[in-house]
Image (spheres, rainbow, N blue to C red):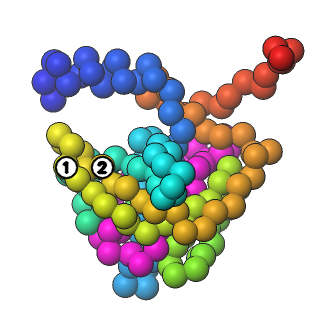
Amino acid sequence: MTAVALDLRRTFAAYPTGVAAIAGVVDGRPVGLAASSFVPVSLDPPLVSVCVARTSTTWPVLARACRLGVSVLSDAHSQVARALSAKGVDRFANIDWELAAHGAIVVHGSTLWLSCSVHDSFAAGDHDVILLRIVGLQSYPEVAPMVFHGSAFRSLAPVTGRVA
């Protein structure tokens, strides 16, 4: 990795993001990955995006799924995020997940679940931007989300003394 790329990685690590599990069933098996680049895009049509490294060996397989489950992980899911980022292991061995409609996989205990289909994708540098169209959703606002900041998984601190 070049010095400029390392500087960018450190700089981007200063920006906190959520962490989402993107998962589905392909050829009868669960396939998934963790992404910290999940972003809401549009209300009409209902779209979200995720960016996936072009070197990913998981995305080309996962892209074949009929439906994709997007689970925004909770602050208790650091092991889930690590498992979905691991190579050469059964990523779902110790994950409490559920098969939703049309092969989408959702992770129990998440802050929200989306069932999506691939709407579009395009190359953007060393990543592909994947636009997902939401076809179903369920949210759990009482569940605290995981935050990825400084190259580490973190929790949000509770808000005290809200300002009106």
Q: Name the spot of residue 108 as percent of width and height, x first.
A: 67, 61
Label 2: state its secondary structure.
strand
Distance from Cα at disc 1 to Cα at disc 2? 6 Å
Q: Which residues, given as a range, are shown in magenta? A: 61-88
- Type of residue at label 1? Ala
Label 2 environment density (alpha carbons within 10 Å; few <14, some 14–19, many ≥20): many
Residue 28 percent across, percent down from the top left: 43, 85
At horizontal 57% and vertical 43% (from top left) the residue drawn is 78
Q: Residue at x 41, y 41 (%)?
A: 37
Residue 94, position as x, y percentages in the image: 58, 63
Q: Is residue 69 left or right of residue 10?
A: right
Q: Which mark is residue 60?
A: none
Say above or below: 151 vs 144.
Answer: above
Q: Residue at x 64, y 63 (%)?
A: 137
Question: Where does residue 30 sit, x and y in percent of width and height?
Answer: 46, 73
Label 2 sits on what residue type?
A: Val
Q: Which residue is mark 1?
A: 123
Q: Is residue 57 left or right of residue 93?
A: left
Mark 1 or 2, nearer chain start: 1
Kindly indicate whether the residue at mark 2 contacts the one at mark 1 (C-beta within 8 angstroms). yes
Residue at figure coordinates x 34%, y 47% from the top left: 51
Q: Is residue 22 found left or right of 153 in the rendered image? A: left
Image: 16 above or below 31: above
Residue furthest to the bottom in view is 28
Q: Nearer the viewer, residue 158 or 30?
A: 158
Q: Which residue is mark 2?
A: 129
Q: 133 or 156: nearer the eye?
A: 133
The question of residue 127 being in magenta is answered with no
